[in-house]
Amino acid sequence: MSNDPLLQPYQLKHLTLRNRIIVTSHEPAYPEDGMPKGRYRAYTVERARGGVALTMTAGSAAVSKDSPPVFNNLLAYKDEIVPWIREMTDAVHEEGAAIMIQLTHLGRRTRWDKGDWLPVLAPSHHREAAHRAFPKKLEDWDIERIIKDFADAAERMKAGGMDGVELEAYGHLIDQFTSPLTNELDGPYGGSLDNRMRFCLDVFRAIRKRVGDDFILGVRYTADECLPGGTGKAEGLEISRRLKESGLIDYLNVIRGHIDTDPGLTDVIPIQGMASAPHLDFAGDIRAATRFPTFHAAKIQDVATARHAIAAGKVDMIGMTRAHMTDPHILRKIIEKREDDIRPCVGANYCLDRIYQGGLAFCIHNAATGREETMPHSIPKADVRRKIVIVGAGPAGLEAARVSAERGHKVVVFEAANNPGGQIRLTAQSERRREMIGIIDWRMSQCEKLGVTFRFNTWADADTIAAEKPDVVVIATGGLPHTEVLTKGNELVVSSWDIISGDVKPGTNVLVYDDAGDHAGLQAAEFIAKAGGKVEIMTPDRAFAPEVMAMNLVPYMRSLQKLDTTFTVTYKLEAAEKSGNQIIAHVGSDYGGASKQRVVDQIVVNHGTIPLDDLYFELKPGSKNLGEVSYDELLSGAPQTVARNPDGTYQLFRIGDAVAARNTHAAIYDALRLAKDL
């Protein structure tokens, strides 16, 4: 047997877990009609197949109708969920993993205009900043009903074959009872710690009465809110002891922090550029104080950190949840001594930011995650070996090269620069985003193992391509900054890329006009502000940087606000003119009625990219398909069979920003779904 701490089994009551790594509860927003149907099941089973010991589903499955999900969660209050749960649990068990589900009542952490438009509930009238709903203060009949709803939902989950349930306390209704900041009730459920904990323990008593002792019960809770007047560490330790001493639960899943604001949520679930495993020692303190099974997860993105957590006795089970979205086969690769092949989580948080914006959770650089029904995590071999030439070694080109090589094809990649990476290499210039280069480094490592030929410092033209005698040509040349957005004075502006790359020196009084709303605009602003420049970020949108999204915005705001940056929304840069050593910026508005001027010494425009597609159009006449893609074949997973030119000698495709400005995930998805069928 291996002596790797991560591979040691763990006995949790009657349940034997095959190793020490878990996927903690999270909601990828894959349910259909509130049920875990095909997409949800395939996603969950893939992690079990990869070797994880325990997968927990449904970050916050709703137990009551007045706990409407603010994004697409499972509805545990419906009887019809039981057979869907059974299909999923049976499939996970067949792969040798245990499976649990997280149940919750959101309390004030939702909105009244979701679901059935029932009043939001809480132990006070205090609004949660993140969801903005003013709650009704709970009455006694609300409390009785919700306790029963928890027990009913747990009984459904046991009927569906779950090994246990975990209650989501932190930030949700249970925590709203426990925290002195959010509990203003009188009587048995408010005031003293005994009273504030009563609701949680009453819920567990009701559940345990329904499900019996041969069912795992746990709680994910905050043992320190890190808020003035809230639950502090000392009280958190006491809460932990009381949870253990209740005899009602089997483990603690420890959190530190609060999630009622975007900054609070980001500190609980850190993103790239923030410290790894920031709460692990705190979880270790809880375990040491309680001597009780303790679980924890918060930016444990690499195997070394996970191994340390177990070896040092910090916790009994360690969660690597976002890491398993990036690579569901972490355990299998550890067992096979292929840790170097693990696709690294780069902390981009595209997964979580998407769900908080109402989308499905997708990994920024594993386009198969969440698409397991149509996209492979393991690439199958092709029947016929072909010669594939790829132009461009950014994320799209490298993914096309990796997948094509996995298929068994002979692959050659041309890149004009001396290093791979494209826009990723540019964005990684920022200290906060340097982890992004892992997207490139992993693909380069995989390509080198697979024998892909790279030709850097080579500007490929039609003759270069023809000399390779390719069967397939994939253009992944990306794009160049688009700054021609003004009615006059376009020659006076520079791009966000110019600033980030260091090709242009930052000005001292700068207007950053950002209507692309992605990272590049904020990165450029931060570079300038850190160099001592006065910065105004202007956008015609009603909110700035919408493509950056909530949690990724937090570190930028912390930095830019300290640097006294001005943020201006709903105004549009229309023209620029030179005035001595200064530039006059003419500002209007799509709303009409506004005409302003700014006098600055530099204007930076962030307006996305335009495709670098000259080579594509040069090659198009010599191709069999004249560049055409059959979307029906692409979406059904069939090989491309378009034949429009009988004289053509190769198939021609383009992917990523060489088609149109999008993002890293889109570029990688383009490459995967094309190349997997070549």
Image: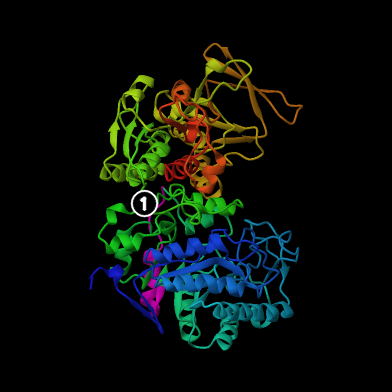
Foreground: 461 or 417? 461
Would you say residue 48 is visible in this rendering?
yes
Q: Is residue 281 magenta?
A: yes
Image quadrant in which you'd find residue 582? top right
Q: Classify 560 as above or below 241.
A: above
Name which residue type carries label 1.
Answer: Pro
Image quadrant in which you'd find residue 295? bottom left
Judged left or right of residue 198, residue 615 is: left
Residue on which disc 1 sits: 344
Q: Position of residue 52 (x, y in %)?
A: 39, 67
Q: Quadrant of the N terminus?
A: bottom left
Q: Classify 28 as above or below 214.
A: above
What segment carries the magenta color?
Answer: 273-294
Q: Classify 452 as above or below 190.
A: above
Foreground: 485 or 555? 485
Judged left or right of residue 325, residue 594 is: right
Q: Residue at x 50, y 66 (%)?
A: 25
Q: Quadrant of the C terminus?
A: top left
Q: Position of residue 378 (x, y in %)?
A: 38, 54
Q: Position of residue 630 (x, y in %)?
A: 54, 38
Q: Is residue 346 magenta?
A: no
Residue furthest toward the top?
580
Judged left or right of residue 137, residue 263 is: left
Q: Position of residue 332 (x, y in %)?
A: 32, 62
Q: Classify 159 as above or below 469.
A: below
Judged left or right of residue 386, residue 677 is: right
Secondary structure beneath disc 1?
Answer: loop
Would you say residue 431 is visible in this rendering?
no
Q: Residue at x 68, y 56 (%)?
A: 132
